[in-house]
């Protein structure tokens, strides 16, 4: 009986150790750290206003912040393929809508939406581009 338990335990360890995990997955912590390195500070919104950008995309709810008092949403997916499906879903949902001005940023397994509405701050845009470039180093 003891050998059976030992065998099952060993089998469990081998199976879990052999599962493929994407070592290139970028986490929310990685994204926030990269933004902070560019002196871009995210704030928690006091209230959550519903808009198309706050919807689940491919089953993932965004992490919602404010950047320069404007909505800043970060979607983190388990893989690059899941991110692509989420983006495809957004495009399908918004193809017939007239949405406010926003920038979409893609990285390995995530999407960022910065809804700047009318005036894009060039220094913020430059910082975002540098932060995304830094994220590629995580891969």
Image (cartoon, rainbow, N blue to C red):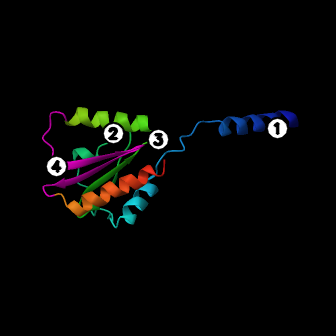
Specify which label sits upstream in the sequence, 1 or 4: 1
Q: Position of residue 48 (x, y in %)?
A: 26, 56
Q: Which mark is residue 64?
A: none
**Label 1 sits on residue:** 6
**Label 4 sits on residue:** 101
Residue at image coords 31%, 54%: 129
Q: Position of residue 79 (x, y in %)?
A: 46, 39
Q: Is 89 above or below relative to 25?
A: above
Q: Which mark is residue 78?
A: 3
- Position of 21 with respect to 43 (left or right) is right
- Position of 45 with respect to 3 (left or right) is left
Q: Are marks 4 and 3 in contact (CB under 8 Å)?
A: no
Q: Are marks 1 and 4 in contact (CB under 8 Å)?
A: no
- The boundaries of the magenta stretch are 95-119
Q: Position of residue 3 (x, y in %)?
A: 87, 35
Q: Is 43 above or below relative to 80?
A: below
Specify which label sits upstream in the sequence, 1 or 2: 1
Distance from disc 2 to disc 3, alpha carbons, whole Å, reads 13 Å
Distance from disc 2 to disc 4, alpha carbons, whole Å, reads 19 Å
Specify which label sits upstream in the sequence, 1 or 3: 1
Q: Secondary structure at mark 1?
A: helix
- Residue lying furthest right: 2
**Label 2 sits on residue:** 57
Q: Quadrant of residue 32?
A: bottom left
Whether residue 122 is visible, yes or no, is yes
Specify which label sits upstream in the sequence, 4 or 3: 3
Q: Position of residue 41 (x, y in %)?
A: 33, 66
Q: Is residue 90 part of the magenta span, yes or no?
A: no
How packed mark 3 is, by other alpha carbons closer than 10 Å (few <14, some 14-19, many 20 or more), is some
Distance from disc 1 to disc 3, alpha carbons, whole Å, reads 33 Å
């Amino acid at each position: 009986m003891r050998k059976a338990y030992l065998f099952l335990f060993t089998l469990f360890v081998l199976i879990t150790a052999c599962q493929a995990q994407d070592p290139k997955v970028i986490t929310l912590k990685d994204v926030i750290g990269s933004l902070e390195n560019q002196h871009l500070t995210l704030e928690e919104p006091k209230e959550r206003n519903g808009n198309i950008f706050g919807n689940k995309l491919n089953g993932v709810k965004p992490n919602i912040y404010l950047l320069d008092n404007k909505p800043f949403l970060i979607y983190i997916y388990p893989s690059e393929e899941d991110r692509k499906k989420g983006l495809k879903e957004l495009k399908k949902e918004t193809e017939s809508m007239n949405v406010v001005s926003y920038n979409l940023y893609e990285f390995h397994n995530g999407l960022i939406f910065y809804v700047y509405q009318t005036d894009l701050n060039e220094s913020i845009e430059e910082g975002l581009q540098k932060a995304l470039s830094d994220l590629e180093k995580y891969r």
